[in-house]
Image: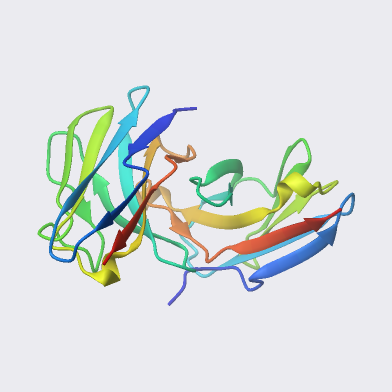
Amino acid sequence: SAVISQKPSRDICQRGTSLTIQCQVDSQVTMMFWYRQQPGQSLTLIATANQGSEATYESGFVIDKFPISRPNLTFSTLTVSNMSPEDSSIYLCSAVGGNNQPQHFGDGTRLSIL
Amino acid sequence: DQQVKQNSPSLSVQEGRISILNCDYTNSMFDYFLWYKKYPAEGPTFLISISSIKDKNEDGRFTVFLNKSAKHLSLHIVPSQPGDSAVYFCAASAYNYGQNFVFGPGTRLSVLP
């Protein structure tokens, strides 16, 4: 299975600033995803990171707030823009090799906004 | 509206006994189901999956059962070990929806020595 590295693992940020989270996969994968896990909640899909084109966002998430890049088959970034305390969450990257295969996750980025 | 439900937020089991975690779903288009385990400060780890053409899949101590008519699946862990203590998430996807997984809220399993 793919090994997924995320960084930073955690950060504390000031309100109004932006943070970019990086996700690196050790092998080429077909699809990469970004999730958010708010305190005490389940995982919520933010968007599918599409290689070479704009990400596909789920309802409630917009590109201006969560711009995503995927320049190649093994790397993606998620930026959390103009952060507020409500953005304090764990952000997780995942990747999958094909249809009806499990997604594999990074260890997440724990983000706290003051 | 939650499409994937795990109605037990927590479960405690004695070491060596069976742990049964339950999951219900509402979307009849789901055709692929998975269980993930999550330890604190780590990402979810894939445990076992089942496609809708099967009703059972077994991998070592872990068995997943699928009842399509009831839209219900369960994860059995036998025998339970203290290292199994974690949060377990049920997830579902539909081929026609791509690889978008919908996750349940999770069940925290505590295996007592």
> Residue farthest to the right?
B16
As drawn, A78 above or below B6: above
Could one spot residue A75 in this view of the protein? yes
Q: Is residue B112 above or below residue A48?
A: below
Relative placement, left or right, of A67 versus B101 is: left
Q: In this figure, which colouring scheme has been used for the structure?
A: rainbow
Tell me what residue is drawn at x 32 percent, y 64 percent.
A88
Residue depicted at x 19% and y 62%:
A14
Q: Report whether B84 appears left or right of A93.
A: right
Left or right: B36 in relation to A61 = right
Question: Can you name the residue that lies furthest to the bottom here?
Answer: B1
Whole-percent x, y for residue B70 in the image = 65, 68
Q: Residue at the far left: name it.
A: A64
Quarter of image, res B112: bottom right
**Where residue B108 sits in the image (x, y, percent)?**
65, 62
Determine which quarter of the picture holds residue B11.
bottom right
In the rendered image, residue B82, in percent from the top left (x then y), is placed at 78, 48
| Residue B16 or residue B6, whichever sits in front | B16
Name the residue at 23% across, 69% down.
A60
Q: How many labels sit on residues?
A: 0
Decide which of B105, B26 is in the foreground and name it. B105
| Residue A83 occupies quadrant | bottom left
Residue at 57% of width from left, 57% of height from top?
A: B90
Residue A97 visible to the viewer = no
Give the quarter of the figure containing the C terminus of chain A: bottom left
The answer to whether residue A49 is left or right of residue A33 is left
Residue B81 on image: x %, y %: 81, 46
Residue B85, above or below A93: below
